[in-house]
Every structure is written in structure tokens, then in C-alpha cells.
């Protein structure tokens, strides 16, 4: 009898993807349009443009920023465009919405930009299911959507205990 321990998981040819690697770890900074509203209700174009010119956008340098309005006000579309034009010069990345939707946006963007699906062509893939960082459903949905066209199979969990999700039929 041999005392050699064989790691069958390592020899299985499974490719593991840990979605935690794509989690936007930085704090998301909120740029709230509420602070620029006249009487807490409306945007007055002339005053708004002047306020933006005086605003210190350098403080957003290298940060993830989401633009939102926490007040119940109607914000014209050009306002978001104008704020975007200022923020883009400094921020690492920008989006709109609350911090939850911004987190989802930055997470999905990381998955789409950092994972080349062709790397997983005809591979057996396990999407890691446990870890120190809680991963929401949208990330699992996005990685599956990205890999189904190329993968041989996709599973969820750990290489030693997986749940089958997808298997190429042809």
C-alpha cells in the first residue's frame, strides 16, 4: 500500500474563479446634488454652474464616486452630464445612483473588464461559493452570463463539493 497522498482536486483540471478578487474594495464616495439645490427643490442653472466651478473636485482624486440626489427633486439630465465632466478629471471611476447600485456597477465592471472569457474556453469552471467577503447574487449572475458562451461546464461551490450550474450539450 502506498503512503502517497493524491490531490484529486488539483488533478481534476477545474479552474476556480474567486469573485472576491473583483470586489471593489474602495469606499464609494457620494456626490449629492441635494447640496446644490435652490431652496432644496430645484437646480438654477447659473448658480449651479458657479457652484461647480468653486467646488473642490480634487478631493475625488483616485476615488470611486457615485452621483445622486437624496432630496425629492427633479434633476435635469444635463446636470448629470455637467457633474460627470468635472468628476472625470479626478475620480478613478464614476457612476450614478445610491451606494448600493454604485457598488453593483463597479463590481460588474471589474468582472467584465478583468475576466477574459476566452481564457476559459472549453474549461470546467468552479465559481467559488464561500469566502471572507459577501458576494451578492448579481455578481454570480454576471460571471455566469459571461462564461456560458465559452465554458465546458460551470459549477458553484468549492472544488471538493460543487453544485452543477451549466454543462455544454454539444
Image: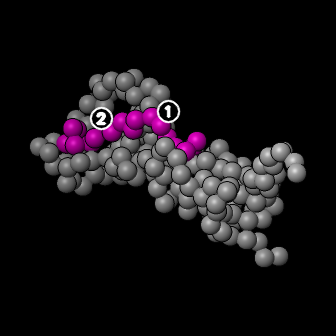
User: Residue placed at 31% from the left, 52% from the top?
Assistant: 76
> Does the magenta segment cover residue 5?
no
Could you classify mark 1 by the number of other residues whose Cα lies within 10 Å: few (under 14), some (14-19), or many (20 or more)? few
Question: Can you give x and y, in whole percent of width and height, for residue 82 in the image?
Answer: 38, 40
Question: Disc 1 to disc 2, how far (Cα)?
Answer: 23 Å
Question: Can you give x and y, in whole percent of width and height, for residue 72 in the image?
Answer: 19, 54
Q: Is residue 11 left or right of residue 32?
A: right
The residue most toward the left is 39
**Residue pointed to by mark 1:** 92
> Does the magenta segment cover residue 32?
yes
Is 53 or 133 nearer to us in this picture?
A: 133
Q: Is residue 160 left or right of residue 150?
A: left
**Residue pointed to by mark 2:** 49
The residue most toward the front is 1
User: Residue placed at 42% from the left, 48% from the top?
Assistant: 102
- Magenta range is 20-37
Classify mark 2: helix, strand or loop.
helix
Amino acid at each position: 500500500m502506498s503512503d502517497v497522498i493524491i490531490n484529486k482536486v488539483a488533478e481534476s483540471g477545474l479552474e476556480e474563479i474567486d469573485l472576491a478578487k473583483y470586489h471593489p474594495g474602495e469606499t464609494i464616495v457620494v456626490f449629492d446634488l441635494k447640496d446644490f439645490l435652490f431652496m432644496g427643490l430645484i437646480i438654477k442653472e447659473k448658480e449651479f454652474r458657479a457652484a461647480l466651478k468653486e467646488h473642490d473636485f480634487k478631493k475625488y482624486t483616485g476615488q470611486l464616486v457615485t452621483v445622486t440626489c437624496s432630496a425629492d427633486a427633479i434633476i435635469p439630465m444635463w446636470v448629470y452630464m455637467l457633474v460627470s465632466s468635472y468628476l472625470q478629471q479626478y475620480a478613478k471611476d464614476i457612476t450614478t445612483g445610491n451606494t448600493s447600485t454604485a457598488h453593483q456597477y463597479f463590481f460588474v465592471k471589474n468582472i467584465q473588464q478583468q475576466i477574459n472569457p476566452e481564457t476559459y474556453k472549453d474549461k470546467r469552471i468552479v465559481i467559488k461559493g464561500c469566502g471572507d467577503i459577501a458576494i451578492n447574487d448579481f455578481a454570480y449572475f454576471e460571471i455566469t452570463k459571461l462564461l456560458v458562451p465559452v465554458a465546458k461546464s460551470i459549477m458553484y461551490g468549492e472544488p471538493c463539493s460543487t453544485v452543477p450550474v451549466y454543462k455544454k450539450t454539444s
